[in-house]
Amino acid sequence: MSYISGMRLSVVIPSYKDPLLQPTIDSLLDNSGLGDKLEVIAVLDGYWPATPLKDDPRVKIIHQKNSGMREAINAGVRIARGKYIMRTDEHAIFAKDYDVVLTKNCKDNWIINPRRYFLDVKKWEVMDMPYVDYSKLLIQTVDKKNGIYKFAGFVDRPRTERRKDIMIDETMAMQGSCWLMPRKWWGDVIGELQTEGYGPLYQDSHEMVFKTWKAGGKLMVDKTTWHAHKHRSFSRTHNNGSPENPSKNAQCWAHSLKVWGDYYKNEIVPKYKEEWGLKA
């Protein structure tokens, strides 16, 4: 579906049994500056919430058979009507006018993510911890003995300090908890998140970044706005998939490396090695 005239942004929330979905929707709506040019699409992946979501004309609900996070995102994007699409996790809060800022600053060939803080979900407030602007993309050793490796983003604090006055800047990796791109870029370049090989859950952000780089685009961080994402000390609902769709982490990581490993080593590392201190 292409965007309709007047609809600026569609926010897709893949959700699996998370009690924080409604507070996240509330934060999106309460802090929006777009009014009726915003739509929020909650994709309920194989469940119904114990307490029904509040009725709001800006909120649409998709209920589907449990298929995993990747397909939940695809399902939301398929019905998105905005010129821009944004994905967020179901446990986050947002800065005032986040949607105005991100859609204004995003270029045609960018994926852009806001500065990331950490959220205390019990107090429902930003934690007193350093924010995240930049992440370096590396191949991480998970289990050397069994030959398990994966693409992973590592927070780059020195770059944060060196480039603190550059408010919109390129980065190499993102957590994936909140990003925005033009709807056309998704259609022309991303296509959809693949589930074959990857499985239902992980490496989605890396897949999108690699596709974007190959098409001549960039991954950017916008420090003029922010979101706060649930800190890892709090429990997850989608951490290991579901009984119907287990995450199969090792297979997902191996598939991602098989698809993108040569491209990363032969093209991305040489391009970014001096700026980011990568090893060839």
Image: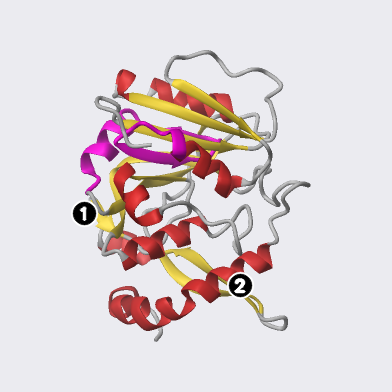
Residue 123 visible in the displayed image: no
In this picture, which residue range is highlighted in magenta? 78-107
Name the image quarter holding the C terminus: bottom left
Q: Do the residues labelled 2 and 1 touch (CB within 8 Å)?
A: no
Query: Disc 1 marks which residue?
Result: 165
Which amino acid, by three-letter code, is at mark 1? Asp
Q: In which quarter of the image is residue 8?
A: top left
Q: Which of 22 and 266 is in front in this view?
A: 266
Query: Disc 2 marks which residue?
Result: 254
Q: Is mark 2 on a helix, strand or loop?
A: helix
Q: Which of 98 and 69 is in front in this view?
A: 69
Q: Is residue 257 found left or right of 97 in the rendered image?
A: right
Q: Residue furthest right?
A: 243
Q: Is residue 45 above or below residue 150?
A: above
Q: Residue at x 37, y 64 (%)?
A: 172
The spot of residue 147 in percent (x, y) is 67, 81
Sequence-wise, which precedes: disc 2 or disc 1? Answer: 1
Q: Is residue 169 found left or right of 78 in the rendered image?
A: left
